[in-house]
Amino acid sequence: MAYYFSYPFVRYALAAVLLISLCSALLGVSLVLRRYSMIGDGLSHVAFGAMAVGVVASVSNTMLVTMPLTILAAVLILRAGHKHGDSSVAVISVSALAVGYLLLSVFGTSANISGDVCSSLFGSATILTLSLSDVWVCIGLCAAVILFFVLFYNKLFAVTFDEDFARACGVNTELYNLALAVITAVVIVVAMKLVGALLISALIVFPALSAMSLFKSFFRVTVASCIISVVCAVAGVLISLAASTPVGPTVVVCDLAVFIIFNILGKTVFTYN
């Protein structure tokens, strides 16, 4: 294992996965408690469709297209969700996924469309091509997410558990909902390169659900979710290097294993308030 970590790109991959997992865990607690967990899955599909638009348009940096379109979709899903519920997520996400694949199939210039689509959806070896600048982007994003939660922890707590009461107390719930949706969109776009469009929602949901199996307070669930996510990320990367498996799916399988174990412990052994 020391041999692998002698290469900078391996260290960059580990750092990026760790940071993105931490961001996803922080966002996941609020999203899961508010029954918005599917927004992560929906936005990941939108990000894939937006990436396809960038590829077809021959944009050198597809993130310039993917980021604004995914943020716009996050706002639209948030607005439509109040009236149409989960159906708005389904309509937008499925449409974006279909349009993205259609564009790549009809206008794509790559000779291996199926391979490119599979890599985008499920992650690939591109995580091992990350540069130091990519790691700095992840560091900046992680710092921004942590700062957001630290500064507005009380407001997020109030909005998460009782939005109507928080609004009655003068909290601008629409603003915090919008901020949460936009930050989620940004994290998903950055994480697509690491674990793929379809797997990023697992990083948002699994750690939060695992923590909720043993802990009941918002603070403990948040801390436990972050720890679980980081540990699973590191374990997934190490297992991937040792077993030569794809990094993204391996990390998600680690999250799944912890989720199963924590559920068994929560139902048969103990829980903490």
Image (spheres, grey):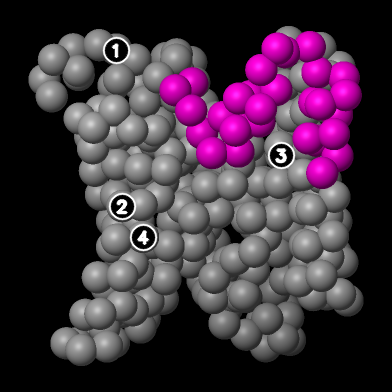
Q: Secondary structure at mark 2?
A: helix
The residue range painted magenta reads 98-126
Q: Indicate which disc, 3 or 4, sits on the residue closer to the N terminus.
A: 3
Q: Secondary structure at mark 1?
A: helix
Marks 2 and 4 close (CB-CB < 8 Å): yes
Amino acid marked by disc 1: Pro
Marks 3 and 4 close (CB-CB < 8 Å): no
Q: Which residue is mark 2?
A: 254
- Vertical side of 47 occupied by 22: above or below: below
Separation (CA) of disc 3 from disc 4: 24 Å
Q: Which residue is mark 3?
A: 47
Amino acid marked by disc 3: Ala
Q: Which residue is mark 1?
A: 8
Reply yes or no: does residue 78 show up in magenta.
no
Q: Secondary structure at mark 4?
A: helix
Amino acid marked by disc 4: Leu
Q: Which residue is mark 4?
A: 256
Quick check: 177 left or right of 9?
right
Q: Indicate which disc, 2 or 1, sits on the residue closer to the N terminus.
A: 1
Marks 2 and 1 close (CB-CB < 8 Å): no
Separation (CA) of disc 4 from disc 1: 29 Å
